[in-house]
């Protein structure tokens, strides 16, 4: 269902019945572990995928940064210059 490098790959799914009676699969909420990393101050031109590529040599690991900062919408992390975010160790 998810790509091998997706943050949802190993997360359990559940069936949810919507108000209209249709059933859909959804990922089960998970508790995130404490994350070690380094603080980073966002610059005006930053993009999360580029930061992930620079940091981890893999631009799809932008979701590691989102998880470390408990941000549901990953791209919001770089919308505001001078914001401090955590770049996890790996």
Image (tube, rainbow, N blue to C red):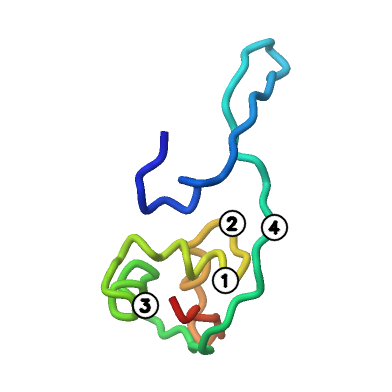
> Residue 20's x, y, as percent?
68, 12
Q: Is residue 83 above or below residue 19?
A: below
Q: Evaluate if marks 1 and 2 touch, with contact meaning CB atoms under 8 Å apart.
A: no
Residue 48 spot, x, y in % from top left: 39, 69
Marks 4 and 1, the one that precedes in the sequence: 4
User: Which residue, as the protein is rendered here, is positioned at the far right?
Assistant: 19
Badge 1 density bin: few <14, some 14–19, many ≥20, Cα 10 Å? some
Q: CA distance from mark 4 to mark 3?
A: 28 Å
Find disc 2 in the rendering and name its residue.
72
Q: Reading the chain from its start, which is encountered first: label 4 or label 3? A: 4
Question: In the picture, which quadrant includes the C terminus?
Answer: bottom left
Residue at the spot of label 1: 68
Mark closest to the chain's N terminus, 4 or 2: 4
Name the image quarter holding residue 58.
Answer: bottom left
Image marks 4 and 2: residues in contact by CB distance under 8 Å: no
Nearer the observer, 40 or 14: 14
Q: Position of residue 45 (x, y in %)?
A: 34, 79
Image check: 79 left or right of 58?
Answer: right
On residue 46, the disc is 3
Marks 4 and 3: which is nearer the front? 4
Marks 2 and 3, the one that precedes in the sequence? 3
Circle 4 residue: 31
Return the residue nearer the eye: 14 or 54. 14
Up-down: is 41 above or below 31? below
Q: Nearer the viewer, mark 1 or mark 2?
A: 1
- Name the secondary structure under disc 3: loop
């Amino acid at each position: 269902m998810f790509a091998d490098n997706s943050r949802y790959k190993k997360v359990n799914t559940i069936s949810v019945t919507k108000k209209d009676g249709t059933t859909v699969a959804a990922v089960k909420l998970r508790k995130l572990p404490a994350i070690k990393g380094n603080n980073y101050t966002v610059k005006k031109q930053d993009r999360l995928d580029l930061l992930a590529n620079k940091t981890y040599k893999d631009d799809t690991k932008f979701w590691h940064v989102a998880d470390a900062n408990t941000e549901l919408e990953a791209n919001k992390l770089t919308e505001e210059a001078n914001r401090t975010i955590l770049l996890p160790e790996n």
